Amino acid sequence: MDVKEQIEQVRNLLLTNKKPSYQTTDKKEVRVRCPYCGDSKKDKHHAHMYIQMMPPFMFHCKKCETSGVLNAQTLRDLNLFGNDLSMSIIEANKSIKRTQGVEKLNATVFDTKLNNVENEYTENAVNYVSARLGKQLNNELLVKKYKAITNADQFFKDNHINKPLDWNNNLMYDFDNSVGFLSSDGSHVIFRDMTGQQRKKYFNLNLQPHNFSISGKIYNISSNVNMLSSTVHLIMTEGIFDIIGVYEHFYKDKVPDNNDFIFAAACGKGFLAVVSHYIQMGFLDLDITIYSDNDVDSQVYRDMKNSSPYLKNNVITIYYNTIEKDFGVPIEHIKLRKMVI
């Protein structure tokens, strides 16, 4: 079956199996009710999830802004997995795997510019991160690989952003003495105080006030990942310094090209939200490893696993650092304890 035949089969089976379902006038999309937000409560005939009729069948809900690629999990959420429709979609996805499918995880939904020009501000940021991790890093690596903002003034100028002020027209944060990190979709910057003198250690700057996507505060290291790989390894931590530390200490020399590896930090959103984010992006199967803060009881992860239809049948590997609270520290301050649930 060629791609055109697969598209027509997907179109016909969607329109037949999902009620309500509607085809757009140009026939490029089919819209159905969104399983993630429940769609319109007032009118059960409304359908806000638009599905493109072209492999790999991207979807986007115009009500809750959830978007991604149809895959096994999304089809389960739509109550369609296991029938001819799901097999057609998976086959169509496989047919394009050889010609595309590499997702650049350094690309962002929003056009946010990062500048790696060096000066005294960037030097302070580089020294701070290097000291935190016990690794001698450089500004180019921090900016390109770790999406760091090492010069806040330059960042605000390049992106035509006014620094946020409080009611008294005072700066809400000392950005010049902070290092920032751009979120997965480029909608937020998570700034971290480097002086220890500010009232708040962290300041989350929303660059897109009208953006409510689940990835708003999730962070990932830049990498290239094959969306249609049979297995993608998702490595997660709670904080940004933790995931950079985990990558630098344990993975950098083993997976230099990051093929089929995603390194992500939840940043307070919760690990289940991170998993959901990458499932909805279209990654077909995730092998999950969590480098946990040591004050999180393992029962939390068992409860998380049992509460998720996707995770219930997955093996999750968890590492604790028995010396320090987390992994945003030099390697000599880390001793691993492993458990599998």
Image (cartoon, rainbow, N blue to C red):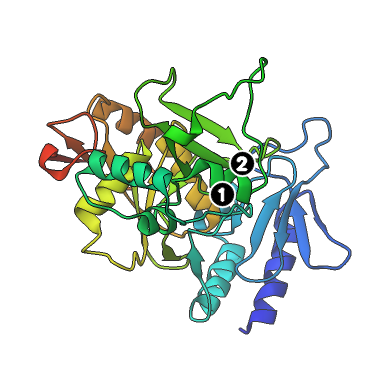
- Quarter placement of the N terminus: bottom right
Which mark identifies residue 38? Answer: none
Rendered location of residue 203, percent (x, y): 49, 29
Task: Please state which amino acid type lies under the numbered disc 2.
Answer: Ser
Mark 1 residue element: loop
Q: In this view, does 161 lie above or below 171?
A: below
71 to the left or right of 290:
right
339 to the left or right of 67:
left
Q: What residue is rendered at 44% in x and 21% in y?
A: 200
| Residue 8, image quadrant | bottom right
Q: Is residue 275 above or below residue 172?
A: below
Rendered location of residue 66, percent (x, y): 63, 46
Q: Label 2 to label 1, Cα distance in Å?
A: 9 Å
| Residue underneath mark 2 | 213
Task: Please state which amino acid type lies under the numbered disc 1.
Answer: Asp
Q: Is residue 102 above or below residue 277?
A: below
Q: What residue is rendered at 56% in x and 40% in y?
A: 188
| Residue underneath mark 1 | 185
The residue carrying pointer 1 sits among few (fewer than 14), some (14 to 19) or many (20 or more) residues within 10 Å by Cα, namely many
Please tell me whether mark 2 or mark 1 is closer to you in this view.
Answer: 1
323 to the left or right of 144:
left
| Residue 207, image quadrant | top right
Question: Is 49 in front, or is 244?
Answer: 244
- Quarter placement of the C terminus: top left
| Residue 275, image quadrant | top left
> Is residue 230 visible to us here?
yes
Rendered location of residue 263, percent (x, y): 36, 51
> Is residue 316 visible to us here?
no
